[in-house]
Amino acid sequence: MTEPSSRQLRALGFVMLLSPATRLLPGAAAREAGHAGWLAPLLAIPFSILVSLLVGRAMSKKEPGEGLGELVIRRSPCVGRAFCGLYALYLALYAGFALRSAASRFIYTIYTGASPLLFVGTGLALALIAALGRPVRLLRTAELFRPLLILTLLPILAAGLAQADLLELLPVTAGDAGGLARGALISLGTLGFAILNTAVLDTGEARPAGAMAGWCARECVFFSAIIVCVLGRFGPELSGALTYPFFALVRNTGLSGVAERIEALVTALWVLSDFVLSAFSLMAASRLLRLSLGLARGPSRPGSVPPRTLATCACAAAALACALMAAPDSRTLRYVSDTLVVWVNLGMCGALLLLTLRCALSSAPPSCSS
Amino acid sequence: MRRGVKRLCIAALAAALAALSGCAESIYDNYRDVGSLQIVQAIGIDGEPGALTLSAATGADASGRPPLRLKCEAASLDEAMLRLESMAGAGELFFAGTGAVVLGPTAAESAAQWLDALTRSKVFRLDTGVYVLKNAAASELLCGKNAPEDVFASLEALSRRLRRTGPAPAASGDALARGLIESGAALAAAVELSDGEPQPAGFAVLASDGLAGYLEGGAASGAGLLLSGAQGEYLTLDGVTLELMSAGASSKPEGGTVCVEVCVKAGMVEAPAGSSLGSDAAWEELEGRLASVIRGRVEAALGASARMDADFLALGRRFEALFPGEAAGFSPARALYEVTAAAEIVNAREYADSPYGGKP
């Protein structure tokens, strides 16, 4: 079997999306679309499938060993290189934000009043070690983490659904259209991050264009289930006001007769998602940075530090700076998390999608100009 | 050589994890010695934001340590908790295990603020049961002379009784917060002190702007029935004892009228010797009487809602969800209610040959 396989990519996408999906989507959907918020991810299904088909079509034209970055640069050398550099910076900063956000969740759920520095430092060290390794290792790790996280999620969702007041999911009226569109866009941005960026590390053999389409639909249904549980328990107003509504749900969910409190366990296991997300972001950022600077190929001089290590460390430094400076307090973090990152992510993913579209629509094989 | 360095690094990292186990005082400060923890099981709040009295009670301890009863005055909940910790002596107060919050009558006037504080708190759980004490300060229940030996056990027993026999299970903090936000009013379990022990006393009607009042007797039963169905209450009609088994209620706006339909199912429990329940007519008469009692209760609850102009039954929210076109501007005070009730009595205990000669 050639790695990465479709299964590994789906596992990677699932594991790294858990963190943003539970942090962002329930609150955002509640604020944007109120009682109808649970529909937002479902509305994103056709668009996410379209994006995955587009990426799949572009990727079908690549050679083994190449990822989306190489394709983009081969199709538009100058613009592609510049964009890859910018996108690498974005991913590095995103890794920092993911670490800061994970630290905030720890502080919110368990370590009240603790400094985020320890969590950020530990997370970054682990992510850096993983990012310096081979991508396939991270993919295999995600494959191992996925069943564990699913096993954790299922009882939470089951208990959440059992306690949900389904009247909170109604009404859905024409007046919700605007909010639903924004909610769907946010869901699409969250999923698009995984669809587009996993393609950066997808250096295996070309696979069918629709390989990820079913996965996209399942992820959207899964997002919707999370939102149903949160909205059903707290209603849209309270959900929108809570810092982490999903973790408030977890905090108030006990498995009767098994465990009264499970938030510490869940918060601890979510580290797996944070780890994969930040390590993946660093790894993809490093790859794009090297592509942008033309350091992807060519042997390094004996005794010198390999370009890959240098690029990954540079990205980790940017991530650290972002984690330490982007959100000095929880109020700023909330703005960064709920607004800034959402729209910047949509912008960056949108731009990458446009370049991918060019690759997908080109009939002739791309010229080797780099 | 490189492989050796790698292995050394891995071993060093693995060893470093030992400091993060949380099983001893380590590099972070979240460690708590279980032996020294005084786990707060119930808190009581009196007063208003800015000048509150917080009381706390720990539970019975397997080590034989006597339960702690503490109270203090402070300007805010967090400040009060900090003060209580300093009063706890050698032990360490642990508030995260709090299972019941009791609001005194004065605190109930600012229930919205206290619920907001609980919702934002990083210590308390939102699903903690909230009780409103009607006839005494909350500190009286937790720290008074006649306070129960184990306050939480008393409140737990009360909670079980409310679940089993009504009028409704005690609402949790998140349910009350949701009710206040969405409907402007919510029903909290009301409690009365009798010889130091908490006893059920219907509902306290919490509103966004304070305590709107209390529901007792039939009104409380009617509200409980509409909110959470029948709770296993026993009713005696003409000497025949019935157990309410289940109830279903539906409501919808029709023009300017709110139509409420209630259907209850009751089981025959006891009938005096010589009861003439063998005929369908007698059985139906009893069902009619039960329906009449239930209708009276529901009307009493709706009447209280109209009088207080507090939508604690969340009818407006229900109409908004199910009948969005007709729900605009629903006000309990302006609505006209039309209540219909139906009752079915069954031989739930499956007497082979009913001692009162009733239907099998």
Image: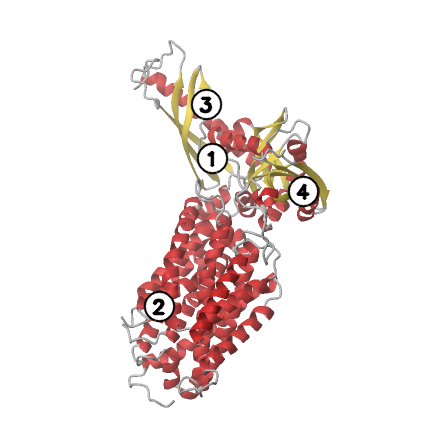
Work out which quarter of the rendered image holds the N terminus of chain A and state it.
bottom left
**Chain under disc 2:** A
Residue pointed to by mark 4? B90
Residue at mark 4 to residue at mark 1: CA–CA distance: 49 Å
Which label's residue is closer to the chain start, 1 or 3?
1
Q: Are marks 4 and 3 in contact (CB under 8 Å)?
A: no
Q: Crowding near pointer 1: few (<14 within 10 Å), some, many (20+)? A: many
Residue pointed to by mark 1? B226
Residue pointed to by mark 2? A9
The numbered dot on residue B151 is none
SS at mark 1?
helix
Q: Crowding near pointer 3: few (<14 within 10 Å), some, many (20+)? A: some
Residue at 50 percent across and 74 percent down: it is: A92
SS at mark 2?
helix
Residue at mark 2 to residue at mark 3: CA–CA distance: 60 Å
Residue pointed to by mark 3? B234
Q: Nearer the viewer, residue B319 or A33?
A: A33
Work out which quarter of the rendered image holds the C terminus of chain A and state it.
bottom left
Please state the horizontal and vertical placement of residue B63, each as a whole percent of the image: 58, 35
Which label's residue is closer to the chain start, 4 or 1?
4
Vertically, is A228 above or below B287?
below
Circles 1 and 3 on the same subunit:
yes
Q: Amino acid at mark 1?
A: Leu
Q: Is residue B49 left or right of residue A93?
A: right
Q: Quadrant of residue A67?
A: bottom left
Residue at mark 2 to residue at mark 4: CA–CA distance: 54 Å
Please state the horizontal and vertical placement of residue B116, each as a whole percent of the image: 60, 48
Q: Nearer the viewer, residue A118 or B191?
A: A118
Mark 1 vs mark 2, foreground winner is 2
